Image (cartoon, rainbow, N blue to C red):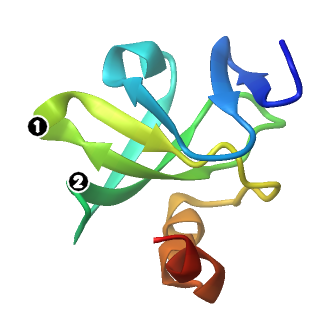
Amino acid sequence: MNQTERIIGGVTLHTDRPTRLPMRDLFAWVIWQFPRPREDGFCGAVHYPAPDQGWLPAIVCADKGAVHVYGHLTTTYDTPETAVEYFNTEKEKKTR
């Protein structure tokens, strides 16, 4: 592993940008989808079910079988609802 990657639940995530993964790579994770369209998917959140892991914002592209995990963020969230709120922040809007 190098400085541009981190591993959560056996899944390698980029530390400098969102990571696009096939859904099958997240088979042990919880994928929460909120029905608000965004880019080519829906706003969502993912969580590896371990006590020390919070929720990460994600874009769920169910029709393509992919998830863009925002594992590059330094913050995790207590609930999927608060993770999805990331998509309403000024910081995120500047990265679009």
Q: Secondary structure at mark 2?
A: strand
Residue at 50% from the left image edge and 68% from the top image edge: 81
| Residue 38 drawn at (x, y percent) | 27, 66
Side of 31 where 29 appears, left or right: right
Quick check: marks 2 and 1 in contact, CB under 8 Å?
Answer: yes
Q: Is residue 43 above or below residue 33?
A: below
Which quadrant holds the N terminus? top right
Amino acid type of the residue that numbered disc 1 sits on in the rendered structure: Asp
| Residue 33 drawn at (x, y percent) | 32, 53
Which quadrant holds the C terminus? bottom left
* Residue 49 in view of the camera: no
Residue farthest to the left? 63
* Residue 78 in view of the camera: yes
Q: Is residue 8 above or below residue 55?
A: above
Q: Secondary structure at mark 1?
A: helix
Residue at 88% from the left image edge and 28% from the top image edge: 3
Q: CA distance from mark 2 to mark 1?
A: 8 Å
Amino acid type of the residue that numbered disc 2 sits on in the rendered structure: Gly
Q: Give the residue pinned by disc 2.
A: 41
Q: Is residue 70 above or below residue 10?
A: below
Q: Is residue 49 above or below residue 18?
A: above
Q: Give the residue pinned by disc 1.
A: 63
Dot 2: few (<14), some (14–19), or many (≥20) neighbours within 10 Å? many
| Residue 15 drawn at (x, y percent) | 75, 40
Answer with the quarter of the image where residue 66 lies: top left
Q: Earlier in the sequence, mark 2 or mark 1?
A: 2
| Residue 77 drawn at (x, y percent) | 70, 60
Residue at 79% from the left image edge and 59% from the top image edge: 75
Side of 63 where 10 appears, left or right: right
